[in-house]
Amino acid sequence: MMFSGGQRAYDRALTVFSPEGRLYQVEYALEAVRRGTLAVAVKSDKDVCLVAQIKIASKLMDPDSIDKVFQIDEHIGCAISGLHADSRILINYARVQAQSFRLTYGEPVRLNMLVKSIADLCQMYSQYGGIRPFGCALFFIGIDEGGTQIYTTSPSGIYRSFKAYALGNGEANAREYIKNNYKENMAFEELIKLALNAIKESIEEQISKDTIRLAYIRSEDKKFKACTKEEIEKYIQSL
């Protein structure tokens, strides 16, 4: 067990608070997010980009079969950190919610509303016995009537908006790098370079077109676009 003595019993059930007011199962889920591969998002007033690292566990594995960045709607993209299986469930839920909003109201879903619905689901899974929290966090980018957006969700049900942020293994170093180098109203190329450099400076492995996923949304068309390997290679070479 992770805890000894009197604390030992408190991490066995999701619905039992410790004397310090903590839910250990939720904290374990947060640790799963921190141990996931790194993802970085950066935005300006006009553009927003999302870069995610993938890990290839074996040389026999096809790197094209692994993904960390997904399209939710025409104007929304998402990266995952933590357990992929749990993330897949939430990604599918987000896609259904986005299309349901379109069918009901005849317009694209606003990102803050979509993120809140996912956070509500995550929170629900932190308060009932017989289930466990989702061991993942979602990292959203989008452009809607509120402008460029970056949101994160947490296994605890918290969701927040950022100008730039990092999630996953090495997030502390990446956030510090972004904090020191971020500027308001950066050009599109500068956003991508900042996100790539934040990952490059925060992980031990070399970044390459096989280990990086890159996507962005520009205000010109407000369409989510995932970069090809050739485009990723071009951006990496420009660093």
Image (cartoon, rainbow, N blue to C red):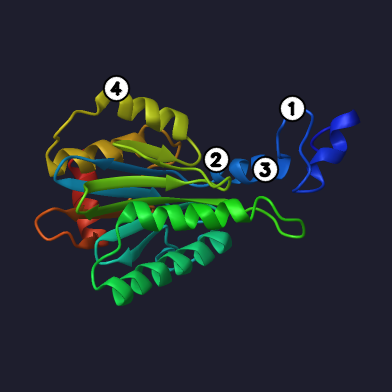
Q: Amino acid at mark 1?
A: Glu
How many marks do you count on the picture?
4
Tell me the number on the disc at residue 34: 2
Between the C-alphas of marks 3 and 1, the distance is 16 Å
Q: Nearer the viewer, residue 80 or 115?
A: 115
SS assignment at label 3: helix
| Residue at the disc numbered 3 | 28
Where does the image place residue 58, in percent across and percent down from the top left?
54, 59
| Residue at the disc numbered 1 | 20
Disc 1 crowd, CA 10 A, few/some/many (<14, 14-19, 20+): few
Q: Amino acid at mark 4?
A: Asn
**Quarter of the C terminus within the rendering:** top left
Instruction: Choose mark 2 or mark 3, whichever is in front.
Output: 3
SS assignment at label 2: helix
Where does the image place residue 216, in percent across and percent down from the top left?
23, 54
Between the C-alphas of marks 2 and 3, the distance is 10 Å
**Quarter of the N terminus within the rendering:** top right
Q: Earlier in the sequence, mark 4 or mark 1?
A: 1
Tell me the number on the disc at residue 180: 4
Q: Amino acid at mark 2?
A: Arg
Residue positioned 55% across, 45% down in the render? 33
Q: Nearer the viewer, residue 11 or 66?
A: 11
Between the C-alphas of marks 3 and 4, the distance is 30 Å
